[in-house]
DNA sequence: GTTATGTTGCGCCT
DNA sequence: AGGCGCAACATAAC
């Protein structure tokens, strides 16, 4: 169970020596538990720590629906730059520095050029299992192979190696959390050896070495303060935040995920370590390890899936399933995804995206997404359910795209996995359980403080009406200086009617998935069998109202 | 075939 | 704050 991978572990890698090693940072923006950096410093006399800026990720896109680049909201761009600045500072404390390169077009071209220009003998980078990353990295490793450059690419972004888990499970990814946990066992220990010095960087030839750019230098000039979330990027912040969270041992030991308050924003109910894990400012293995330390010091502690350690296992669960599932990020060609005829509706989609549905709970969450790039897990549930199976019946891929761009913790595997979950397309199928856009938030925050903070126009709406302002008498709306239909939108759908309609459509979609989608099992061999034996039992009519079971 | 299980619904009850 | 009925999905294990 605890066996280290047989090939390419840090010790093996360290035996080979090269004059110059290049450490390519992408995620994994940290010094602690960094096997790639560790291998480089042990095996080379000169180490070049490199990050390549991708203009498509960073350049402001004026056509985008909210501030940011085409691919990332400005909150995540800021978080990345802060993380790079911190990484540079931490490398400098070890006598090194971060070499920030700018890709002209393709990131892999820039890496290959540096490998050649600096005469690199060994390339080290953290393995990344996203399809985009696999394609990018293959271009580089192909070049390295052709140039005789040794490559070391350890798994250190996740607790486990997804490929290894899939192999252990008989070639298929485990599709339930429990089977995943049973297959996975205990994660490897983080590489935490302290050292005071890194090998110096070598000659960088004619390369112009610029510091990490400022947001303003990238063209983000007149940004309002509102787009500065209260979370700063970087490894230093990550370790500080983790230690603060773990300091309260009782809180850690009693952590039980569905019990948190999604409306808490001044002091969020969960750790908000997700953006740090996303960029690798914090090692998941180190975090997991520290949680286990806390557990050892308390009498009892909660268990997966609801415990804090269990949250990290969810992360690895989605990484593993996504790695082993072709077309994981879409409905088409995705074997684990229910085929559902989602509806096309640009107007409703834009209302959702821009926080103009007329349901303050939903809109406040979408505005928190746009401005902070982070919302509580259950808040994400609320808006994802509303967009898809709960109210609007719009494709989860459209919601996924919005989250992918705007979340500061935007993560391909986790985001897609959770959208599959919430839309009842995979993993979870109880489409009758629909979040109410009114009562769900109200039970945590009856006064509506969360709404008032993110939707200032509603700040004087009496609490009796703040979750349903369209029900407020006009005199109340006037007194609150918020006229529904003018200052704040009317609801785009009626939740009662819309959710009922959604249930019906889901039932139909599921029925046709059973008929058409699964012709493998239940064929003619048992078609002659009828349920005569049930004849004496009194089956309530309601249970018969659905499609008759056709098994022929 | 049947049965147990599954992180996170709502409304209503106490 | 927690328990219950509601209505009910899929998967794994037997
Ligand atoms: C529609 C939707 C989209 C999501 N998209 C993302 C995303 O792009 N990136 C992302 O990191 N999380 C995503 N999540 C999962 C979850 O909401 C966040 O990870 C969590 O809210 C982050 O806050 P935290 O760090 O305080 O979590 P904590 O509760 O403190 O958990 C600690 C860590 O565990 C991991 N984790 C927690 N919940 C989940 C989960 N459900 N699935 C996988 N890993 C989890 C995260 O890395 C998190 O940082 C999404 C959830 C939904 C419903």
Image: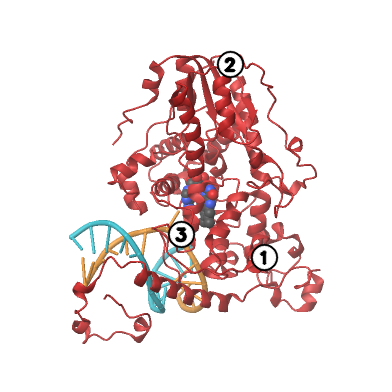
Chain colours: A red, B orange, C cyan
Q: Nearer the viewer, mark 3 or mark 1?
A: 3
Image coordinates of residue A480 in percent, x first then y, are 79, 69
Q: CA distance from mark 2 to mark 3?
A: 47 Å
What residue appears at the point 42 percent right and 34 percent down from the top-left corner?
Answer: A155
> CB under 8 Å between callouts 1 and 2?
no
Residue A330 bears which disc, if any?
none
Image coordinates of residue A335 in percent, x first then y, are 39, 58
Q: Which residue is mark 3?
A: A332
Image coordinates of residue A67 in percent, x first then y, are 72, 49
User: Which secondary structure lies at badge 2?
Assistant: loop
Q: Which residue is mark 2?
A: A201
Mark 3 vs 1, N-terminal side: 3
Q: Nearer the viewer, mark 2 or mark 3?
A: 3
Q: Which residue is mark 1?
A: A351
What residue appears at the point 71 percent right and 57 percent down from the top-left corner?
Answer: A453
Above or below A66: residue A134: above
- A303 or C1, which is in the foreground? A303
Q: CA distance from mark 1 to mark 2?
A: 51 Å
Q: CA distance from mark 3 to mark 1?
A: 26 Å
Which chain contains the residue that carries disc 2? A
Mark 2 vs 3, N-terminal side: 2
């Amino acid at each position: 169970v605890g066996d280290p991978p047989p090939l390419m572990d840090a010790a093996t890698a360290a035996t080979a020596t090269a004059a110059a090693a290049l450490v390519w940072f992408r995620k994994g923006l940290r010094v602690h538990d960094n096997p790639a950096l560790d291998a480089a410093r042990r095996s080379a006399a000169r180490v070049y720590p490199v990050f390549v800026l991708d203009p498509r990720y960073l350049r402001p896109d004026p056509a985008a629906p909210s501030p940011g680049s085409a691919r990332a909201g400005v909150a995540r761009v800021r978080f990345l730059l802060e993380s790079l600045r911190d990484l540079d500072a931490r490398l400098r404390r070890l006598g090194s520095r971060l070499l920030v390169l700018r890709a002209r077009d393709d990131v892999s071209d820039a890496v290959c050029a540096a490998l050649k220009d600096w005469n690199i003998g060994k390339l080290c980078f953290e393995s990344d299992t996203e399809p985009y990353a696999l394609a990018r990295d293959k271009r580089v490793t192909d070049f390295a192979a052709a140039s005789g450059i040794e490559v070391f690419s350890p798994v250190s972004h996740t607790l486990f190696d997804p490929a290894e888990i899939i192999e252990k499970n008989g070639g298929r990814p485990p599709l339930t959390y429990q089977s995943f946990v049973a297959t996975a066992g205990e994660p490897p220990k983080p590489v935490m050896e302290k050292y005071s010095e890194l090998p110096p960087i070598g000659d960088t030839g004619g390369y112009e070495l610029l510091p990490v750019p400022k947001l303003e230098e990238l063209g983000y000039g007149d940004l309002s303060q509102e787009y500065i979330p209260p979370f700063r990027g970087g490894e230093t912040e990550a370790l500080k935040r983790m230690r603060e969270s773990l300091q309260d041992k009782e809180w850690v030991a009693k952590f039980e995920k569905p019990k948190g308050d999604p409306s808490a924003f001044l002091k969020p109910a969960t750790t908000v370590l997700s953006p740090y894990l996303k960029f690798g400012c914090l090692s998941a293995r180190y975090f997991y390890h520290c949680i286990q330390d806390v557990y050892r010091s308390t009498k009892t502690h909660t268990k997966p899936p609801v415990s804090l350690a269990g949250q990290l296992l969810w992360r690895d669960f989605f990484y593993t399933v996504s790695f082993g599932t072709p077309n994981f990020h879409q409905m088409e060609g995705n074997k684990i995804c229910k085929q559902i005829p989602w509806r096309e509706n640009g107007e409703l989609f834009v209302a959702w995206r821009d926080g103009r549905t007329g349901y303050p709970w939903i809109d406040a969450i979408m505005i928190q997404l746009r401005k902070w790039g982070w919302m509580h897990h259950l808040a994400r549930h609320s808006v994802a359910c509303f967009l898809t199976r709960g109210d609007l019946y719009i494709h989860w891929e459209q919601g996924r795209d919005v989250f992918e761009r705007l979340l500061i913790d935007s993560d391909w595997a986790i985001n897609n996995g959770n959208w599959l979950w919430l839309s009842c397309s995979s993993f979870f199928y109880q489409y009758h359980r629909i979040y109410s856009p009114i009562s769900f938030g109200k039970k945590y925050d009856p006064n509506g403080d969360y709404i008032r903070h993110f939707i200032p126009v509603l700040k004087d709406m009496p609490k009796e009406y703040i979750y349903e302002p369209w029900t407020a008498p006009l005199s109340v709306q006037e007194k609150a200086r918020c006229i529904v239909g003018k200052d704040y939108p009317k609801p785009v759908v009626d939740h009662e009617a819309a959710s009922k309609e959604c249930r019906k459509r889901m039932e139909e979609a599921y029925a046709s998935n059973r008929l058409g989608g699964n012709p493998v099992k239940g064929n003619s061999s048992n078609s002659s069998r009828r349920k005569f034996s049930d004849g004496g039992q009194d089956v309530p009519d309601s249970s018969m109202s659905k499609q008759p079971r056709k098994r022929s």
